[in-house]
Image (tube, helix red, strand yellow):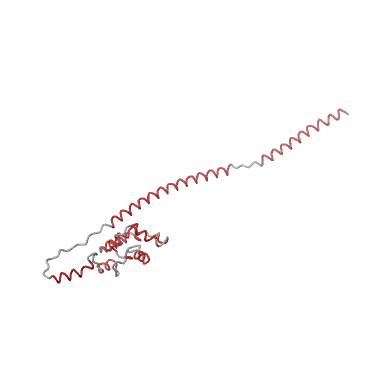
Amino acid sequence: MNFENMNIWCWIIPLLVGLICGILGYLLGSRSAKVIDNSAEINSLTASNTKLKGELSDLNNLKASNSKLKADLDACNQRVIAASKVVTPAPVAPSAPSTNLGASAASFAAGAATSSALAFDGSAAKAAFGKTIKQDDLKLVEGIGPKIEGMFKDHGIKTWKELSEASLEACQKILDTGGTRYKIHDPASWPLQAKMCYEGKWTELVKWQDEHKHGKL
C-alpha cells in the first residue's frame, strides 16, 4: 500500500512542478510582451530636432544678412541726399551797358518775380513726356500721387525746388503723418527727381524714370 502511494506521488510531484513552471513562464512571457519598443519614435524625434537646429542656424544667417543690407541701403540714401542738395546755379548772361534807364528799370521789374528760380519751359517738358506739364506739379515725381502731393504742400513743400532741397528724413516724416498705409513708399529719390524737374532736365528725368520703376533707386 505504501509502495503504491509512493508511486503515485512520484507522478504527481513532477506534474505539479511542470504545471507551476508553465504558469510562471506564461506570466513572465505576457509581461515581457507588454514592453513597448520606442526606438522608432526616438529616432524620429532626434531627426526632427536636428532639422530644427539647422533651420534656426539658417534664420540667424538671414538676420545677419538683413542687417548688412539695411546698413548698405542707409548709406545709399545718404549719398542720394548729398547729391540732391548740389544745385547748379542758373547761368547769368552778361548785361550790356544800357542807354535807356527807363527800359532797364522795366526789365528789372519784369524779371524780379522769376529771379530766384529757373525759367520753366513747358514746351520742352511736353516734348519729353508727351503731355502738358504744369509747373511745380509734384506728381511728376515718380512715386508721388495726389494724396502725397497734398501732404507735402500742407507741410510747406509746394515747388520742385523746395522738394529738391528737402532731406530724406523730412520727406519720411511727412509720409509718416499719413499712417501705416504709406510705409510702402520710398522717398529716397524724390529730391533727386525734383531737382531734375527744377533744372528743366526733362530728357534725363524721363530716362531715369524708365530705368527706375516706381521711383526706386
Quarter-wise, where is residue 101 in the image? bottom left
Looking at the image, the residue that sits furthest to the top is 3
Q: Is residue 99 left or right of residue 34?
A: left
Which quarter of the figure is the C terminus placed in? Answer: bottom left
| Position of residue 104 measured from the top left corner of the image (x, y, whole percent) | 15, 69
Q: Nearer the viewer, residue 175 or 19?
A: 175
Rendered position, 59 above or below 12: below
Q: Nearer the viewer, residue 121 or 156?
A: 156
> What residue appears at the point 64 percent right and 41 percent down from the top-left corner?
35
Rendered position, 100 above or below 38: below
Quarter-wise, where is residue 134 in the image? bottom left
Q: Nearer the viewer, residue 181 or 201?
A: 181
Looking at the image, the residue that sits furthest to the left is 99
| Position of residue 36 measured from the top left corner of the image (x, y, whole percent) | 63, 42
> What residue appears at the point 22 percent right and 60 percent down from the top-left corner?
89
| Position of residue 193 measured from the top left corner of the image (x, y, whole percent) | 30, 61
> What residue appears at the point 39 percent right and 49 percent down from the top-left corner?
67
Quarter-wise, where is residue 107 in the image? bottom left
